[in-house]
Image (cartoon, grey):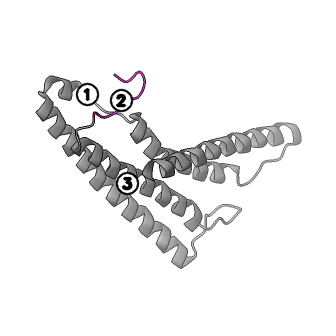
Amino acid sequence: MIDGLTAAGNLISALCLLAIFGLVAAEIVMRNLMGISISFSWDVSAYLMGACFLLAAASALKGGSHVRVTALTELLPPRGAWALDFAAAVIGLAVTVLLVWSLGQMAWLSGTRGSTSPGVVRIPLVLPQGILTVGAVLLFLQMVAQVMRVWSGERLTNGEGLE
């Protein structure tokens, strides 16, 4: 289930990246050919970039694409390397709990206050902040899976070209 949610987050992240491309391309064409600007393009692109980053974070963790320094674990005996990996996974889990809590609180506060972006198009901030929270929840779930993988003795994945 966690891997399925992670894959869905990754797909939505890719769609966000595609939307950024379309929005920036439209802005360039409109500005150069018609002399007008799409007033909301930079704001929306920034929100989409944040969504892209956090929605793909769980997939990057699962695939071993996050930065992971293995120089120390390679020097340690297997039990020491396991202990270090486990400690890092637990610390990562604690950090994601704080991230989910903070982003959730921010989205909740924006929703209850009716906060909007300061741009020309008044986007309710609960929308981008809520999406960031969903991405953080996906990362949290993948961190739970990471802790369980390390606990069970499974070797952590290093992304291609990272070893």
Residue 18 seen in this snapshot: yes
Amino acid, disc 3:
Phe
Residue 46 in picture, x, y percent from top left: 59, 49
Amino acid, disc 1:
Thr
At mark 2, the secondary structure is loop
Residue under numbered circle 3: 140
At mark 1, the secondary structure is loop
Amino acid, disc 2:
Asn
Residue under numbered circle 2: 158
In the picture, which quadrant includes the C terminus? top left
Which mark lies nearer to you, 1 or 2? 2
Residue under numbered circle 1: 70
Q: Residues within 10 Å of mark 2 (few under 14, many from 20)?
A: some
Residue 61 in picture, x, y percent from top left: 39, 41
Q: Earlier in the sequence, mark 3 or mark 1?
A: 1
For the residues bearing labels 2 and 3, Cβ distance under 8 angstroms: no
Q: Residues within 10 Å of mark 1 (few under 14, many from 20)?
A: few
Separation of residues labelled 3 and 1 (CA atoms): 22 Å
For the residues bearing labels 1 and 2, Cβ distance under 8 angstroms: yes
Q: Note whether 153 is above or below 42 in the view shown.
A: above
Q: Quadrant of residue 115?
A: bottom right
Q: Earlier in the sequence, mark 2 or mark 3?
A: 3
Residue 27 in picture, x, y percent from top left: 76, 43
107 within the magenta span:
no
Q: Nearer the viewer, residue 94 or 113?
A: 94
Per the rendered image, the range of residues in magenta is 155-163
